[in-house]
Image (cartoon, helix red, strand yellow):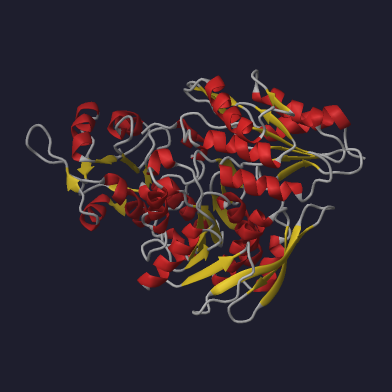
């Protein structure tokens, strides 16, 4: 499978990985040598592999190339590129074997009925099970994964000296950081990152786990020490079809095959259902966390709950008290505003504590974990002259509601929101986003997000339909049809010293997806330029 986003991850591979006999892997994972046209079978007895790759543009010499069936094309179509780059053998399904033999005569081919399902465990074996040398955490949920994973990154770094991170924003091991192609990378890439982390003496890993990744086996072969769940909100229904199927996908992470223990936020019905399911199975221990309403410990003594959450208008941080099942009372500070971030912070604290981090270490590190890329990222802070300008990733109706309520708490003047919605994704959320923004913000600037193959005007029209439901006269609503950057600049132009402008939807993302083009773009530098143009450098 060719995906040139992986090219930037080429440096993230170990340098001292002892080769593994391919015949040993074939026996361990029931891989069958492919039958050739002459009736013989490919021999792998003399071969060794030093790594595993799933992308033809990211193959190193001596590696095994896994040619996976894809949604649009079969990875076998790229086997010749992989072999030219140094792959010594190919693993594919029976349908792909014939194509590989035709395009790569003489290259040994192994087959498996479901090569995607075996790629992770096989890569873990090739890289000598690197996760066993690290303290590992993984966070799943609709919203809050990135924020929580960065909170854990700060905490685990304080506890272990260094932490690998793999998620939506970046892939980072030590001093090497590259843009991430997706929330959760393919299993062989994840395993080789873990191997590099172990080789470099990195002590921990903080991972994000998307529902797509769980279903598509990208986490197979990895058992994390603690897995956490933030929330479940309307998103990805183009893939999962129903909310129950969406939850079922997330639930697969909280099994002995993937996690040693679970920490679940139960502020929504889906989290409560998930926690009950895990507890009923009895397979792994589970802690429940409630951030939004004060809640006494449950009958089994596993609940953690938050009280006294308070937002500071001065520094936009939130203080709170975390109560534990053994009577713990932990005073903490989240460096971001709002209850939605208290939920993320409380989850990170409980996950860290259950991973063995002393509470005092976790609390001190959490307080320093600010300015996460595209997550309530402050571009300017209110100072009597400037207004507050923020970039955030909120892109679902529930996330938008929580985000705008959080920002309202730190806004003495008007709340201005710049937003749009994705093309080729869940169309039902577009009017819902419009209604939420019309209800909770003072000024709306509607623009494009990632139109992809859709007509951008049709997406904006659907948003404005929802806006009219709450604000029929479209008062203080502007539509920018030219370029997203123009909408960001317009939001800053409208912002007074007591106002807050928040640009939502793209967060950290480095591209706009328009038709078949990926155009370099990021909200943060555009907003920063607009702030400097309006107010200059801060005093």
Tell me where residue 530 appears, x and y as whole percent: 78, 29
Q: Which of the image's four quarters has the C terminus?
A: top right
In percent of width and height, residue 277 lies at: 40, 66
The answer to whether residue 472 is left or right of residue 87 is: right
Instruction: Identify the residue at horizontal 70%, vertical 63% (top origin).
Output: 365
Left or right of residue 344, residue 494 in this image? right
Residue 355 position, x and y percent, is 54, 69
- Please identify the quadrant where the N terminus is shown: top left
Camera-side residue: 516 or 103?
A: 516
Is 149 on the left-hand or right-hand side of 528? left
Outermost residue, bottom side = 326
Residue at the (36%, 54%) spot, across then down? 220
Query: Please, is residue 94 above or below residue 424 in the view?
Result: below
Q: Is residue 310 above or below residue 175?
A: below
Instruction: Report whether residue 105 is seen.
Output: no
Q: Is residue 277 above or below residue 80?
A: below
Q: Identify the residue shown where x is 88% and y is 35%.
A: 537
What x and y, as percent, mark residue 35? Answer: 12, 39
Q: Nearer the viewer, residue 251 or 195?
A: 251
Residue 237 makes an appearance in the image: yes
Q: Residue visible at 47% across and 52% down? A: 209
Q: Is residue 133 above or below residue 434?
A: below
Residue placed most toward the observer, 494 or 187: 494
């Amino acid at each position: 499978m060719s995906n040139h986003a992986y090219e930037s991850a080429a440096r993230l591979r170990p340098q001292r990985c002892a080769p593994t006999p391919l015949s040993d892997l074939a026996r361990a994972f029931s891989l069958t040598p492919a039958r050739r046209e002459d009736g013989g079978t490919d021999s792998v007895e003399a071969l060794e592999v030093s790594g595993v790759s799933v992308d033809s543009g990211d193959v190193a010499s001596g590696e095994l190339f896994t040619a996976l069936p894809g949604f649009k094309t079969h990875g076998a179509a790229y086997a010749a590129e992989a072999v030219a780059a140094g792959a010594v053998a190919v693993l594919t399904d029976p349908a792909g074997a014939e194509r590989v033999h035709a395009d790569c005569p003489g290259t040994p081919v192994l087959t498996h009925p479901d090569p995607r399902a075996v790629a992770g465990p096989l890569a873990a074996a090739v890289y000598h099970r690197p996760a066993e040398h690290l303290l590992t955490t993984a966070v799943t949920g609709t919203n809050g994964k990135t924020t929580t994973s960065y909170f854990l990154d700060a905490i685990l770094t304080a506890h272990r000296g260094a932490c690998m991170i793999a998620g939506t924003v970046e892939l980072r091991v030590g001093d090497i950081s590259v843009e991430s192609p997706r929330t959760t990378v393919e299993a062989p890439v994840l395993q080789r990152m873990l191997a590099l982390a172990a080789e470099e003496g990195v002590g921990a890993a903080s991972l994000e786990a998307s529902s797509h990744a769980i279903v598509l086996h990208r986490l197979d072969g990895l058992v994390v020490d603690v897995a956490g769940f933030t929330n479940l909100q309307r998103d990805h229904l183009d893939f999962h079809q129903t909310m129950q199927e969406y939850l079922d996908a997330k639930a697969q992470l909280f099994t002995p095959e993937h996690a040693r223990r679970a920490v679940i936020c139960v502020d929504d019905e889906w989290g409560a259902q998930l926690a009950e399911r895990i507890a009923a199975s009895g397979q792994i221990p589970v802690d429940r966390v409630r951030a939004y309403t004060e809640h006494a410990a449950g009958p089994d003594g596993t609940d953690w709950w938050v009280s006294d959450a308070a937002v500071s208008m001065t520094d936009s941080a939130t203080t709170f008290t975390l109560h534990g099942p053994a009577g713990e009372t932990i005073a903490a500070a989240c460096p971001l505003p709002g209850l939605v971030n208290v939920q993320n912070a409380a989850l990170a604290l409980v996950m860290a504590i259950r991973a063995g981090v002393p509470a005092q270490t976790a609390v001190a590190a959490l307080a320093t974990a600010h300015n996460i890329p595209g997550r309530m990222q402050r571009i300017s802070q209110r100072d009597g002259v400037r207004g507050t300008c923020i970039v955030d990733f909120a892109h679902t109706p529930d996330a938008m509601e929580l985000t705008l309520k959080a920002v309202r708490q730190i806004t003495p003047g008007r709340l201005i929101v710049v937003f749009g919605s994705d093309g080729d994704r869940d169309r039902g959320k577009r009017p819902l986003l419009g209604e939420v923004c019309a209800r909770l913000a003072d000024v709306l600037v509607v623009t494009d997000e990632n139109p992809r193959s859709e007509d951008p005007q049709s997406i904006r029209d659907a948003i404005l339909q929802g806006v009219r439901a709450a604000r029929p006269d479209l008062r203080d609503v502007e539509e920018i049809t030219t370029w997203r950057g123009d909408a960001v600049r317009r939001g800053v132009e409208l912002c007074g010293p007591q106002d807050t402008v928040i640009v939502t939807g793209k967060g950290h993302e480095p591209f706009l997806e328009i038709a078949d083009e990926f155009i370099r773009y990021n909200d943060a530098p555009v907003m920063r330029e607009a702030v400097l143009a309006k107010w200059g450098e801060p005093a």
